[in-house]
């Protein structure tokens, strides 16, 4: 198994918070993505505590880092 970089975008469905892109080093991309969806999109959570999960690119991650500074 080979470690890979993966970039995850978290979006607040209520629109109160700006989207965030995080970088992760993962062994299994599909397993990690499904784990993130399970954690952040849990229907048992209140809507304001949920985040929509999607995969982002390294370029999008780098651009988001420039905006935050």
Image (tube, grey):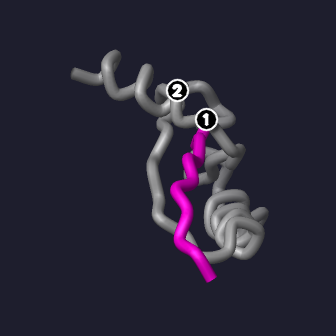
Task: Name the outermost residue toward the top.
Answer: 67
In the image, residue 36 lies at what x, y percent? 64, 64
Residues 61 and 4: in front is 4
Task: Name the outermost residue toward the bottom.
Answer: 1
In the image, residue 68 lies at what x, y percent? 29, 23
* Contact check, label 1 and label 2, Cβ < 8 Å: yes
Q: Which label belongs to residue 59?
A: 2
Chief secondary structure of the magenta span?
A: strand
Judged from the image, the secondary structure of the residue bearing numbered disc 2 is helix
Q: Is residue 2 magenta?
A: yes
Residue density around tag 2, few if under 14, some if 14–19, many if 20 or more, within 10 Å? few
| Residue at left offset 47%, top offset 64% | 25
| Residue at left offset 48%, top offset 30% | 17
In this image, 67 relative to 46: left or right? left
Name the quadrant of the N terminus.
bottom right
Q: Which label belongs to residue 57?
A: 1
Judged from the image, the secondary structure of the residue bearing numbered disc 1 is loop
Residues 38 and 47: in front is 38
Q: Which residues are magenta?
A: 1-11
């Amino acid at each position: 198994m080979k470690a890979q970089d993966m970039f995850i975008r978290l979006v607040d469905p209520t629109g109160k918070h700006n989207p965030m892109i995080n970088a992760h080093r993962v062994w299994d991309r599909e397993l990690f993505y499904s784990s993130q969806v399970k954690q952040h999109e849990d229907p048992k959570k209140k809507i304001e505590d949920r985040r929509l999960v999607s995969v982002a690119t390294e370029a999008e991650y780098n651009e988001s880092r420039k905006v935050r500074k």
